Amino acid sequence: MIRPFGRKPDPVNIQRDCYAMALKEGNHAEITMYGQIVERRPTDWWTGEPIDGNFIVKSEFLDDLDAIKGARKLTIRLDSLGGDAYASLLIYNRLRELKAKKTVQVDGAAMSGGSVIMCAGDTVKVNPGSLIMVHQCASFLYGYYNGDALEKARQSNAAVDKALASVYAKKTGMDETEALEMMQQETYLTGEEALAKGFADELLENEDAPEIAASADHSTLFVNGRALATLGYPLPGGIPVAPDVKASVSTTQEPTEESGEGGQEIMAKTFEELKAQNPDLAERVEAEIRADLDGLVQKAVADERQRLADIDSIAGIYSGELVHEAKYGEPPCTAQELAFRAAQEAARRGKEALTDMEQDAQASGAKEIGAAPAPEETTELSPEERRAAGRSDAQALKKE
């Protein structure tokens, strides 16, 4: 809040699970954004309880943003794989509205919606090892749709893509057509490449480069030891695998002895020795190895994308907790295994429900209550029997 008569605003220190806002030195604010951008906090489908995770919730973030809107300088430290496109665009626009001079520093990754928020900075600083990614928006569909409904969904996505392209074009100076082409190709950029394309304004050569690595199944990206779910985005093959990054091919392997070009015997004991003795042969061997590795990486990426797509196709009928565990759990599983897990969970819940009902019945004592006695059977009397009974009743009354 701004005080009258030129007094400095009150200090602000807001701490959330995955972002923080602070106002210091009277007019300099800082925001740290490390997490996934969401419209609302995800909840478990079965229990309704919030799901644990690093979520930057749009409503919370915008409410907190009002506390620092009087700052003259704003530094945003960013590490996000993105999330909801609409929420990302809204946060971008609200940041652009601030009168403060804005500096965005990409500490790790700025992918998808994170790259949109990155563009809100008047100055964008990146590390050489920072990772930037732009792509088209995607929508999750479940159920049956006719052509008109699918066309409406396509038009909606196309409109969002144009909005995203205009953000990138404004920041980089490229035209929107070029930005859309980069998005269609799902383009990944290092810090230096982002600088060359105009997404960044300064390369932090003197800063400690972030340590970026991926899990073996590429479902998690580790930035300086901090895990971020990849949200199904396929990561480029060049990212090392955590925690121990080892070369896929040993350079100390002994090659089979064979004749080289010109009849020279190849006696190299290491790959470096092979390159020194016969560079042409070493180059061919390396090319073959790279081709094999590229093929393996592409197949692994395709398999992982298909696994996630299969899970998304049935995710609507299962709890968010089960779907999240299937995608990113230890270990992750296929859509078929997810269905089996869900069936096991349903059977367990059904068994517990039957057990509870039986215990309630025993506690109520309902089993100890006997059946109600049957009414006595009656037979209809003849006219003579009714008259005789009447006379008998009359005599009985007289005697009384």
Image: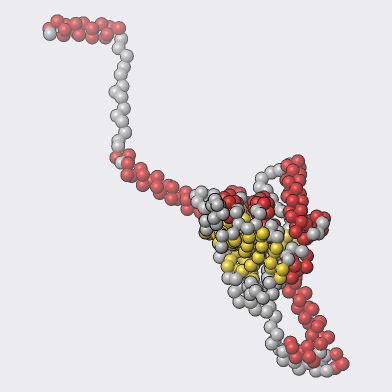
* Nearest to the observer: residue 90 or residue 358: 90
| Residue for point 63% across, 67% down | 107
Where residue 267 sits, quadrant-wise, is: bottom right
Residue 115 at what x, y percent from top left? 69, 60
Q: Relative to 358, does residue 309 appear above or below in the rendering?
A: below
Residue 98 at what x, y percent from top left? 65, 53
* Nearest to the observer: residue 137 or residue 9: 9
Q: Relative to 70, does residue 213 appear above or below in the rendering?
A: below
Total tally of numbered discs in the picture: 0
Question: Which residue of the protein is positioned furthest toward the front in this rendering?
Answer: 5
Horizontal side, residue 273 vs residue 382: left or right: right
Quadrant, the C terminus: top left
Horizontal side, residue 72 vs residue 361: left or right: right
* Nearest to the observer: residue 279 or residue 364: 279
Question: Which residue of the protein is positioned furthest toward the right in this rendering?
Answer: 262
| Residue for point 30% across, 37% down | 369
The colour scheme applied to this rendered structure is: secondary structure
Where residue 153 sits, quadrant-wise, is: top right
| Residue for point 63% across, 73% down | 211
Residue 56 visible from this viewpoint: yes
Residue 236 at what x, y percent from top left? 71, 67
Residue 307 visible from this viewpoint: no
Residue 67 at what x, y percent from top left? 56, 53
| Residue for point 73% across, 42% down | 149
Where residue 367 sits, quadrant-wise, is: top left
